[in-house]
Image: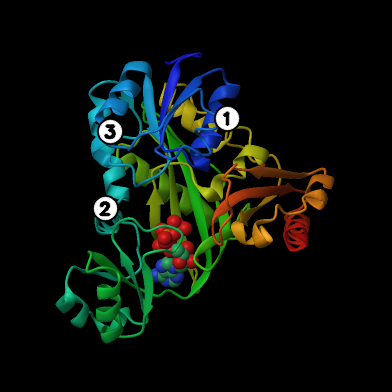
Amino acid sequence: MIFPDAMLGMLGGGQLGRMFTLAAHSMGYRVTVLDPDPLSPAGAVADVHLKAAYQDREALQQLADTCVAVTTEFENVPADSLRWLASHCTVRPAGDAVAVAQDRIREKAFFTSCNLGVAPYAVIECDSDAAKAPAHLFPGILKRARFGYDGKGQVRVANADEARKAFKDLGNESCVLEQRIALKCEISAVVARGADGIGRSFPVSENRHRNGILDISIIPARVAPELAKKAEEWALRTAEKLNYCGVLAVEFFVTESGELLVNEMAPRPHNSGHYTIDACMTSQYEQQVRTLCGLPLGDTRLMSPVVMVNLLGDVWRNGQEPDWTKVLADPSAKLHLYDKGKAAPGRKMGHITVTAPTLEEAIRRAEALHAAL
Ligand code: ATP
Ligand code: MG
């Protein structure tokens, strides 16, 4: 086990890295963040902020020399940097597991090999793949295999001609074409798995999106208990088959007929797991610290029904800081801001969590607070 006050390394300086750093600090660890952005949300709270590119050999060397263990907070961190670091210190999750999650083609093949259902899809590597795409995939969504997030790098397509055009517009890069699923809802499961192979899931979250970006998460998810259980099992199975060590998030579709399909995974804590900070015994960030340091996993028990609302840059009208009076006046609403500086439409600036004795009340109050902003 790695005990406080060891120095831990974090590749990536976004809000997930910031919340990891805060959790690590509260347990007495120190944190070095590597992120080229001088104004990064995690860099601002870290003990050391290395402002360099993720492939910068000198910066990686410094991480290796000063940190006992290194983790990551975003999936597009170069897997090779993780692999290089692994020859010098503990790295969790492993670069090989992250590499699967970085590529939708590998990811879907992996889920299929685990016997988990995915939306019908085809791999599109060239114009003629798009031209020959099977009719049952339309209407569909063409997604770039790499470097997509928050619905970016995706185009809705109604037929093969539109798929050809979208493939060109997305830069002639490898893509997957997915059938558009009629959704009853979307859910996600965040799981943690230790180096000893013991895994544990947080309660499943129900996620509502707006413009391809997560808008609110509702916990516990309003789905049949067997379905929530199945989602947890699938996420744990994914972690096990990847021989994963760390925190892993798996996103699911629930179809109109009630079938569970895996959408994608993220090799890190997840936006839909922010609620764990205020409503679970252990947060997903503490769990990340625990898996990184080889500590036993914390209890994931839900203490209260909870709703999380994302605060996007759109709420900062004309760049003005919103009026937080109503949020701060609500004794069971928690405001989290990421210190991102400039607000832009669609940019994740913070979130609010609202707990209440019943889920209905939590939803009502969260929506009212959101509307007031
Ligand atoms: P994020 O980083 O926010 O998770 P992403 O860019 O990785 O998003 P996806 O998760 O693939 O993209 O898609 C974003 C959202 O678009 C999904 O949560 C869902 O609401 C919708 N969506 C994606 N694929 C499908 C599909 N095949 N059928 C129906 N809706 C879909
Ligand atoms: Mg997604």
Q: Give the residue number, with chain letter if any, for mark 2.
A: 110
Q: Residue at x 22, y 24 (%)?
A: 87
Amino acid marked by disc 3? Asp
Amino acid marked by disc 2? Phe
Q: Could you tell whether 370 is left or right of 228 in the image?
A: right
First in sequence, mark 1 or 3: give its number.
1
- Badge 2 element: helix
Find out if the beta carbon at label 3 lies less than 8 Å from the nearest ligand 1 atom: no
- Looking at the image, how many numbered discs can be counted on the residues? 3
* Figure colour scheme: rainbow
Q: Mark 1–mark 3 contact, CB under 8 Å?
A: no
Q: Position of residue 289 (x, y in %)?
A: 48, 27
Residue 56: mark in rendering: 3
Q: Give the residue number, with chain letter if any, for mark 1.
A: 22
Q: Position of residue 202 (x, y in %)?
A: 54, 42
Local packing at callout 3 (Cα closer than 10 Å; few below 14, some 14-19, many 20+) is few
**Viewer-nearest of labels 1 and 3?**
3
Q: Position of residue 19 (x, y in %)?
A: 55, 36
